[in-house]
Image (cartoon, grey):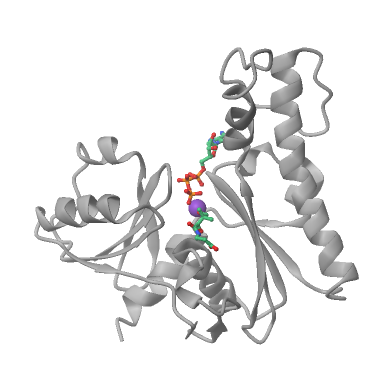
Amino acid sequence: MKLLIDAGNTRIKIANLDNEGRLEPVFTGSFEELTSWQPGADIEHAWLSSVGDDDKSSALIDYFESHQIKVTVVATEADAFGVTNAYAEHNTLGVDRWLGLIAAHMEQPKNTVIIDAGTAITVDWLAADGTHLGGWIIPGVELMVTAITSRSRRVFVKDTAYGRANHLGSSTPEGLQDGCVNAFVGIIKQALSVTETELDWSDYRLLLTGGSYPLLPADIKRRGEERPELVLQGLSYYARDPG
Ligand SMILES: Nc1ncnc2c1ncn2[C@@H]1O[C@H](COP(=O)(O)OP(=O)(O)OP(=O)(O)O)[C@@H](O)[C@H]1O
Ligand SMILES: CC(C)(CO)[C@@H](O)C(=O)NCCC(=O)O
Ligand SMILES: [K+]
């Protein structure tokens, strides 16, 4: 059994990878929560992708090494598993985005738009031949909310309620939370529009991942395919083929 670790800017997600290549999510939470979780005794090797700073990665590596687990850190490459990175400075593309591209291409080579909505929201375009065409980065829904509340006296949130797609707010907290959710919906619609008008793709799939997925309206959920483990799936290819 191997361990796959996807360390985002907020949460850490961990899955077991068995010898048949099956992936089983076993942990989602903060680093603090992780220290009260025990990896299985039969695990000797873990693959880590981390978008945080080096201190965070080192703390994770130390934690797993203290459990006698060897940690291999996966980094973004220029080319791998049939995918070609769009960035000239290939290592500056977030490793979570890189792994999402690999997961999508390995699942099925097809024109694809990938949306990952967590701390940040990212959009990536991947052509059927494995060419990454580039993408976008905007603040995630929670960051959009706090960007305003931290800088204005009269815009505030009352509780941790989520905003609603297609809903009009009738108070400041509702207006802000609804507004930010609808900005998230809006970037997806703009991505689809650019895909159809600029790239001229007519047959393509939309993959949706990240913690903010539940906020999406039914029409986008229907149009897309949910892939909650996309980054872990990408990691699994590195773990299967340690090269
Ligand atoms: N049930 C839910 N409904 C709506 N939003 C949710 C729900 N659960 C979590 N979220 C939101 O998901 C986001 C976290 O997503 P995710 O775990 O993908 O982020 P992350 O770990 O920071 O990843 P990354 O840093 O890679 O983006 C937070 O903004 C959180 O508010
Ligand atoms: C954009 C995030 C924060 C999304 O998790 C991550 O992919 C990252 O830190 N990327 C580096 C910058 C880039 O991808 O261009
Ligand atoms: K993520």
Quadrant containing the N terminus is: bottom left
Residue 126, picture quadrant? bottom right
Residue 32, picture quadrant? top left
Nearest to the observer: residue 204 or residue 40 = 204
Quadrant containing the C terminus is: bottom left
Q: Is residue 217 above or below residue 99?
A: above
Nearest to the observer: residue 87 or residue 15 = 87
Left of 184 or right of it: where is 5? Answer: left
The residue shown at (34%, 82%) is 241
Q: Is residue 118 visible?
A: no
The residue shown at (60%, 42%) is 140
Left of 186 or right of it: where is 229? Answer: left
The residue shown at (57%, 76%) is 87
Nearest to the observer: residue 71 or residue 204 = 71
Q: Is residue 1 above or below residue 139?
A: below
Q: Is residue 127 visible?
A: yes
Task: Return the x and y of residue 147 as percentages of the image width and height.
Answer: 60, 32
